[in-house]
Image (spheres, rainbow, N blue to C red):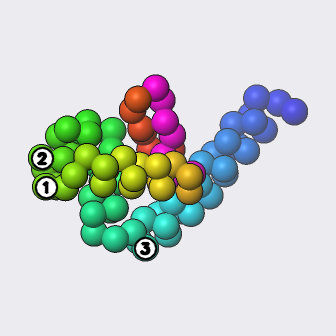
Amino acid sequence: MTNEDIKKIREMLEFLVKQKISERVSHLTGTEKKVYDLTGIKGQSELVKTLNVAPNTISNVWKKLESEGMLIKEGKKYRKVV
């Protein structure tokens, strides 16, 4: 397999992942969507203030989205898959 083949496979996989995540995002509740949209931009304490929700709410949404493959946990922080 050449590097060009690997590059094409990667591009196709990224496209499919983005498509699946986009479909899933459209089914999130209001708070879940806001948390998802701001993940990687704001930390948990900023999200609590911005969204006026409890810290547990943010943690629970992050855990749920991680279990669904939409977020990746890196240390104590989360980031979007794509």
Amino acid at circle 2: Lys
Judge the density around disc 3: few (<14), some (14-19), many (≥20) Cα neighbours within 10 Å: few
Q: Earlier in the sequence, mark 2 or mark 3?
A: 3
Residue holding disc 1: 52
Image position, residue 32 (x, y; %)? 34, 61
In three-dimensional space, the C-alpha distance between marks 1 and 2, rounded to whole angstroms, equals: 5 Å
In three-dimensional space, the C-alpha distance between marks 1 and 3, rounded to whole angstroms, equals: 21 Å
SS of the residue at dot 3?
loop
Image position, residue 55 (x, y; %)? 25, 46
Work out whether 76 lies above or below 30.
above
Circles 1 and 2: CB distance less than 8 Å?
A: yes
Q: Which mark is residue 1?
A: none
Amino acid at circle 3: His
Q: Is residue 17 visible?
A: yes
**Which segment did they paint magenta?**
69-75
Q: Which mark is residue 27?
A: 3
Q: Which mark is residue 49?
A: 2
